[in-house]
Each structure stands twice: as C-alpha cells, then as structure tokens.
Image: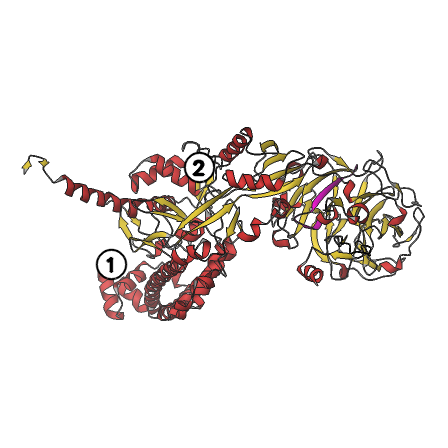
Amino acid sequence: MDAGLIRKVDIEHEMQSAYLSYAMSVIVSRALPDARDGLKPVQRRILYAMHDMGIRPDTPYKKSARIVGEVLGKYHPHGDAAVYDTMARLAQDFSMRYLLVDGQGNFGSIDGDAPAAMRYTEARLHSAAAEMLDTIDKDTVDFVSNFDDTLTEPEVLPASLPNLLINGATGIAVGMATSIPPHNLGEVIEALLYMLQQWTKLDDVSVEDLMKFIQGPDFPTGGVILKSTDEEEGLAAAYGTGRGKIVVQAKVHVEEMERGRSRLIVAELPYQTNKSSLIERIAELARDGRLEGLADLRDESDRQGMRIVIELSKTADPDKLIAALFKHTPMQGTFSINLLALVGGEPRTLTLKQALRVFLDHRLEVVKRRTEFDLARAKERAHILEGLLIALKHLDDVIRIIRNSKDTEEARARLMKRFKLSELQTNAILDMPLKRLAQLERQKIEDEYKEKKALIKHLEKLLASPKLMREVISEELKELKRKYSDRRRTQIVDASKRASMKAADLVPDETAWVTLTRSGLLSRAYGGKQPKPAKDDAPRALVQANTRDLLYLITQKGRTSAISVYSIPESDDPANGTPFSALGPLDSAARVVTAVAVPAEARTTTNGEETEAATTGTFLIAATAKGMIKKIAAQDLPAPSSKVGEVMSVSEDDQIVSAGLSNGNDEVLLISALGQSIRFSETEVRAMGAGAAGVQAIKLAKPGDVIVAMSVVDPKAEAFIITDVGMGKRVPLKDFPTQGRYGVGTMAMAVMGKAKIVGAAIGSPNDKLVMMTKGGARVGKFDEAPRRGRPARGGTVIKLKPGDAVEAILPFLPRLEVALPEPPKKKSRGKKSESGKQMALIKAETPKAKAKRRD
C-alpha cells in the first residue's frame, strides 16, 4: 500500500535485496582488484585521472589536492581521504614493490606515520604506471560512463605489466577477502615467457614448472620466507590452490663489538610490519624480563636503509635472544595468501597458472585491438595518399577542374566523378597546400605510401597469426624486464635448515665486490659481480670479500674503522653508494686511502680457542710513503665499534699509501715513484701491536722519492707499473730478487725526465684493473702494458690528452686464501693426537674454489 512517497514493503525482503546490492557493490566496485590489471576501481581512476591531466613521468609534479579533486569530481564521488590515502599508498616504497605514483613530499613511513596533508604533497605518474596506461588511446580497452554519465572511464587498463602479481593486493569485501603478495617482476615475466612458449600445450604446464621461475613472493621490505617441505602448506599449496600460508621473518645478523660483545642488526622486516611498534614491543619484553641479555636498543635507520640495533650483554647468547625475538615479536609471523580477484566481473580464487593466463589473455586482446586500430589508421592514411598520388599524376586536370568550379562543393563533386575518388580523398586534395606540388614533396608522398602499404601487410599478417601475436607479446615482456627488473629482495630459505641455524649463520655466505670511491661512498655489488667504476667518482679500493667478512677502512694516519661487509648496502652503481661515515665511526673528513677485507675465518675460533690462523696465519701489512712497514695479526685488529681504531702509528710528515693481507710466510714488494724497489720476506717484519709505528722497509736513495705501491708477492704473477705520463710495462715478479729488509733494493723501471711512477699492481695478463687519469677512469687489462725487463723503460699504455695525467691504477683485489687447521681429532688410546698437522685450504670466494675445498 502506497501513501504519497511512502511505500510499505516487507522488511525481510528489503534487507535481503539491499544487502545483496551492497555486497556486490563492495565486491565489484571497491575491495577486489581486476585480475587483468591488478587494480581496484579507485586505483584505476587515480591513474587514469593523472593520465588525463597530462601528469606524465617527465612532467612537473602536481599538488595532490588537485589530483584528488579531479578524481572526486569526475570519476569517484566518495570521501577525499580515501582517495588520498590510496594515492599515497601507490607512492610508498615499503608498500608497493613497483611504484605506480611518483610522490614528492611526506607520503608516510614504515613507522606508521600518516602522509602529510594533500595540500603539501605533490605527485605524478611513475614510469611503471605509464606502462600500465600505454596505448589506452588506441581503443585497446572498453570505456564505460562515469557516475553521472557526463564522461567515460576505462573499464580496465591495457596493463603491459602483470600488476596483480608484482604489486599484489589486499582488500576486505563482504564475505570474502583478498590477500595477494607482491612478486619479483623478472621472475613473473620469465614464467609468462615460458607459458607463451608452451601455449599449444598449456594443459601440461604445472605449478612446479612455474615455480622454477617464480621462487615465491618478493616483498618491498625484503625479509625472509621460510619454505615448507610439506606440500599441503606453504608456497606450493598457495600457488596450486590459490590459498595458503607462509612464514616470514625479519632479516637479522650479528656484528662484533669491542671487548668481546656483540649486537644484533635488524636490517629488513616482514611485509606490513610497523617498525615503531616492533621496537616498542621489544622494549616492553625487555622491561618485563622476557628478553634476557639485551643491553641497549636503538633505531639507527636513515635514508640509506633500516638498521635496528640490539646490543647484547657480554654473557648473552645471541641464538637464544634471536629465537625469543622471533617467538614473541612481529619479527616473525605468517602471511596468508588468497589469490582472489575479479574475472569477468565475478570474484574467483585463482591458482598461479590461472592468474598468469588471465593476464596473457588480456594482453592478447589488447595487442589485437591495438593492431586493428593501427591497421584502420594505416588503411585510412594509405587511402588518402593514394588519392594524393592520383591528383599529382593528373595535376593539370585537377588544377583546371578546381579553377573552373564556382565553389568547393562543385570542385569536390567534379573531382570525385572524374577520378573516382572518395570524399575523404577529395577533401585531402582540396586541403593540400601548394608546396606539396614540389618534386621533393611528391617523392615523400610516394615513399610514405609505400611505407603504409608495407605496414598494412605486416599488420594483416599479424592479425592472421596467433603465433606472431604471442611473439609480439614476448618481445614486449622482454623489453619490460630489461627496463624494470631488479634483484630479488626477499630471501627464501628452507625451514628445516633455518631451524638449525646459529646466529652467525644468519648472514648469507656469499661472495661480494666492495667499492670505495674517492668521495667516500661504499657499495656492495649485487651477486658478487665486478662493479663498474662510476664516471664522476673514481674508485679508491675494489675488494672481493665474503658477506661474513669485516672491511677495514684505513686512513693516511693509520686510523681504521671495521665494517661488516653484509651491512654495506647493495648497489650496482658505486655512485649510489653510502658514505662510509654513515656505516662506522670514521668522520666524513677522514682521508681514507684504502680498504682491506679480513676473511671471517681469519678471526674465528675452534671449540672456544683461537685457531692457529687467528694467532699466526693472517696479517695486515701497511706501508708508508717514507718506506715504513707495519705488520699486525688479524686478531689484534679492532672489532666493529663506535670508536675509531688504529692499525699503525704514523709520523706527522708521513702517510700510509698501501695495505694488504698476508698469510704469514709471504713476500712483499715495494716500489717508489722514481723507480726504486725492494722485495723481501715478511718474516723479517715481526707482528706488532695496534699502536706501533713499524720498521723501515727500504732505504730510499734519492731525495724526495716516496713509496707509491706495496703488494704481497705472487711468484707466478707480474707487476704492472705505470707512470703519470702513461708509460708502463709488465715485469715478471721472478725478475725482482729477494733481499734483506732495509736495503736500497733494485731498479723496478727506468723513469725518464720529470715522469714519476704513480702506481703498481700485481696480477696475471687477463686480470682486470682500473686506470685513473685526471679525465676519468676506465677498466683495462694487465696485458695492455708491454712485457719488459725489470730495468727497462715502459711503453705507451694510455694516450693522454694535453693537460691530462695518470693518477693511479687499482686492481680488482681477490679475496685472501686463508689456511685453517682441521678441527682436533679425538685421541685414541696409546696414540698421540695428530690434530693440527694437516691444513685445509679454504677458498670462499668462488664456486670453483668451494668445489675444490669439498674435494
């Protein structure tokens, strides 16, 4: 019964109807992403609005309030706070694996800080978002009316990036929720390429096949995933069924401190963990006495990265404390995976294979529609050009018809009738400027017509061949991988092995190349590959190390700072390194001359006692410009500390020029600027304490001469020597006689005129080194220098421009081979133990060396 505007209905029926409408609205229009582009409606509207406003990656930033207003007014008539929070999240590098919005200003932090007000921040599209929107103007996707039917918006984006998997999604709908973790773009693209290769036999592609490429989630905050061997749990289940759980942990390692103490460094957190809340939780547990051995807790995080420092008391057990932290704090937790997304407008739980297939089907449709659009435009243009060519061929007749016509309409009709032209062609002829009648312009029209005909043929062939279409998508994916792929951030380890790990094992056992630049930037190259010198910041040291080693920075005056190699941020570009002052106690004004990586095994202990190597087998040797030499045992080097350490006492008028490591029975070679050299056994230099000044290594014969290089001798190698004028040579080390310390030595190279030797390095012909001049640095090889006798002059190694000069050379220093004794054997009755008589050579720097060690 109706009474005016009031209509009586059954409340049960109305509640059912209204709730279902609300539920579907939340599911389809708010909480769940589309499986094709991985975006929720509000995210898609933000990106499209920015695209529509012309805010590209290469344009100036726009105020966030302006963007939010555009989204609200045109596409999303809801709360401004919700739109701004969504846009802010797209700009957060701790939330998004691959940013879609390039933000300027405070967009929040991992501590849970809210973004600044939208009137303060600015934003523009990130380059990855531009890829998502690419070709949207070529009718590649369907458009639908906006909320008031005044504008249109895309139903889905063309999405050349597999955004659903690489950035993931979270959302709570009605009666369902989605939780998709982010993944590594390079791995996802490799899986997509594999599926394209197997397209005709996709039914045979299994989850196991895809997991050969996609190791698992790759969170923007890094951390560790514990891989379960149970097929009904973990990654295999999640990828095979669309649902599962994984255990995630913070990445933590142990650093040594002075006086035998140590500290835990938390460098990465599980995804969506609030750092500030974590620190508060640790402090609360310490106050309640539930964490034993915690001496101090502080947050040293900065722009270079996260660094939560947990200092331990001297009696604390790092293993027990780490286990307690994982048990009682968010440093360990579970991430529930539910691959729920909209497919055809309906929510579906997808397997990994299905998620990849939906994306590929979408890309095939987009490329097909793009090709059809390009084909239509090419045919239209070719049609016009064909008309222009007809007109140019009958130019006199065309001009006569136009001149004799009383108006444009008559000219159009007569031209169409005379030459059987279409209205489109006729309009192009009538609109053609007179300058196009020139012979050169006529040739351009003919060339363009040929190009369009070839393009039409290619596009028609493409549309007729699904295989060619898939090849196009493959090439586009390879290009995207080249542009945006990066290293994996999240480490995946076997859960069973992780459980038996000790604190010291938490640092990965990996080879790394460390670069120290002249401006004081430290970086660790990804994957252990040799770094390329920065163009504007030449290297001062290039050291191969293990992530468990300690890097000692040594200044001109013998001061030092010990830094864990693992704590040095990774970067392929040394120019993007971290200032050494941010990683240790040395001030930024300190004149660091070199860096030495001391292997972890050189400082280890066996059964609580120092090994033979730690007491007699590994030494740091340093030499000064005035010919002093100092030898210090590895275990006497200072541990990482908040205070600056010392390796050598250097007089005011002297400075350290070089340093390296030895195994106790090596020989050393020193070379001076004027060509003097000496080679002697290191046994002639006794090991001294940290504060000692050392002993004299050589009698420099000429006034003003100084030592420029000191190296530990490899008898089978060669010495590469170079002068400031670019003259140099290679000399077999056997040509340098072994003498007693503190002699005048022998001539290393005949130096002519005012030239001076500026550097020397030891290596083999195929070894690489960096040659630095005033004009820059470049990587070269030892064999670029001619091989000459010891007293001979050198040949031209570097052709210098006027005013340029060689400043130094720098070898890629391989990691030291440390000889360690085998663990003591158990004594048998009536026989003495033979432990300590056999030595096992550890070579940790290469897989080949590791294999040799195992043999």
| Amino acid on which the number 1 mark rests in the picture | Thr
Residues 337 and 737: in front is 337
**Which labelled disc corresponds to residue 650?**
none
Magenta residues, start to end: 542-557
**Which labelled disc corresponds to residue 408?**
1
- Residue projecting furthest to the front: 829
Is residue 231 in sight in this rendering? yes
Residues 536 and 617: in front is 617
How would you rate the neighbour count of disc 1 (Cα within 10 Å): few for under 14, some for 14-19, many for 20 or more?
Answer: few
Name the residue beneath numbered marker 2.
122
Q: State the CA–CA distance, disc 1 to disc 2.
A: 52 Å
Classify 389 as above or below 637: below
Residues 233 and 304: in front is 233
| Amino acid on which the number 2 mark rests in the picture | Glu
Residue 730 percent location from the top left of the image: 82, 59
Mark closest to the chain's N terminus, 1 or 2: 2
Residue 206 percent location from the top left of the image: 43, 64
Residue 588 percent location from the top left of the image: 68, 35
Q: Is residue 683 left or right of residue 847?
A: right
Dots 1, 2 in contact, CB < 8 A? no
